[in-house]
Image (cartoon, rainbow, N blue to C red):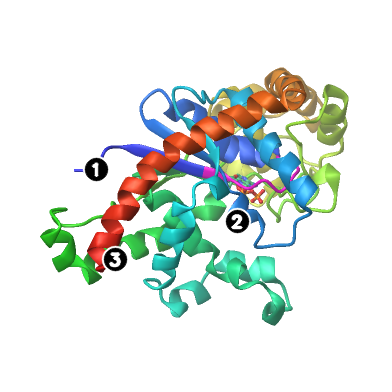
Amino acid sequence: KFIERVFSGVQPTGNLHLGNYLGAIVKFVELQRTHDCIYCVVDLHAITLPQNPEDLKASIREVTAAFIASGVDPRQHIVFNQSQVSEHAELAWVFNCVARIGWLNRMTQFKEKAGKDRENASVGLYAYPCLMAADILVYRATHVPVGEDQKQHLELARDIAQKFNLDFAASIAAHGHGEGFFPLPEPLIQGPATRVMSLRDGSKKMSKSDPSDYSRINLSDDADTIAQKVRKAKTDPEALPSEIEGLANRPEAENLVGIFAALNGETKQNVLKAFGGGNFSAFKAALVDLAVTKLGPIGAEMKRLKNDAAYIDEVLVDGADRARALAHENIVAVKDILGF
Ligand code: ADP
Ligand code: NA
């Protein structure tokens, strides 16, 4: 009953990295062949933590440039920034009234991001998953490509969709929408790098906010920087195993093998077939070559686009117009269902 439609977002908070690329953006590009796709720079999410307005504007353009440089086609599909389509915020309010406090209390990302001083975190940071559910469901999207860290938020989005459908079942049917107004969106979490870890600490995920720049490979890094970061990446003293089981309890080795596999579009097992038994220095040299080959052109294209802010802004305006048309229709229907 629902059109298969993909929605996903990336926050404009600087330091776009290999985890964002392998966990999300690579799949954004793939899904364009089979689905109608909407890719969003989620700037309303960014302000759940303090942002400098000038940096925020630059980051919105940077994420847009990264999408396009990676192969997202903003003409065939939709690319825009969230704040320009106010229907996201409208539906988020409705979802604030559907979701239960107990559900939000279980969200681990809030606990991590709020840290020890929870009383001082913004209300927005707490309600973030309701806005994320609105981002997806305002388009009645059915599939959401994300990294593993977003799994819990996707489950909450499904719970919200289901509760809305149940709470308003009679009104939904009376307005001719059949059994349920919202689809239950499915996360697409696949491949060998759904959770890319820090290059300095195999127990932490690669993240924009890690104070160590050596913990991550940024999409804007040049070849020398990529080479240095891979060479310095933490490993262990053992040789690489020949079988996947040999990666157990070796998070740094597993991470590098996963990164190689994802960049090369193959399985970890295949990588071990080629490099198992060898030491890390030969493997790292091959990983540098691969990373530079795959990421170099993206970084160069991002740099080129950075000097063409007029083009980026035009993409965003055009994308927002098309997104708004879809979102508006659904918001009108939601208001009817609610009795407004
Ligand atoms: P970050 O978590 O770096 O602040 P976002 O929240 O904007 O970035 O996430 C953008 C996308 O990148 C999401 O789909 C998220 O799951 C994915 N992602 C972020 N970090 C990683 C990682 N270390 N490994 C795999 N995917 C990741
Ligand atoms: Na994230």
**Crowd band around label 3 with a 10 angstrom C-alpha radius: few (<14), some (14–19), many (20+):** many
Q: Mark 1 vs mark 2: which is more N-terminal?
A: 1
Q: Is mark 2 within 8 Å of ligand 1?
A: yes
Q: Secondary structure at mark 2?
A: helix
Question: Where the N terminus falls, by quadrant?
Answer: top left
How many numbered badges does the structure rendering display? 3
CA gap between label 2 and label 3 equals 22 Å
Left or right of 299: which side holds 329?
left
- Residue 59: x percent and y percent? 72, 41
- Residue 237: x percent and y percent? 82, 42
Q: Is mark 1 within 8 Å of ligand 1?
A: no
Q: Which residues are magenta?
A: 9-16
Residue at image mark 1: 2
Residue at image mark 2: 45
Q: Main secondary structure of the magenta part?
A: loop
Q: Secondary structure at mark 1?
A: loop
CA gap between label 1 and label 2 equals 27 Å
Q: Which mark is residue 164?
A: 3
Amino acid type, residue under disc 3 in the picture? Phe
Amino acid type, residue under disc 2 in the picture? His
Q: Which mark is residue 87?
A: none
Q: Mark 2 vs mark 3: which is more N-terminal?
A: 2
Judge whether residue 241 can be spotted in this image.
Answer: no
Q: Pointer 3 and pointer 1: residues touching (CB < 8 Å)?
A: no
Amino acid type, residue under disc 1 in the picture? Phe
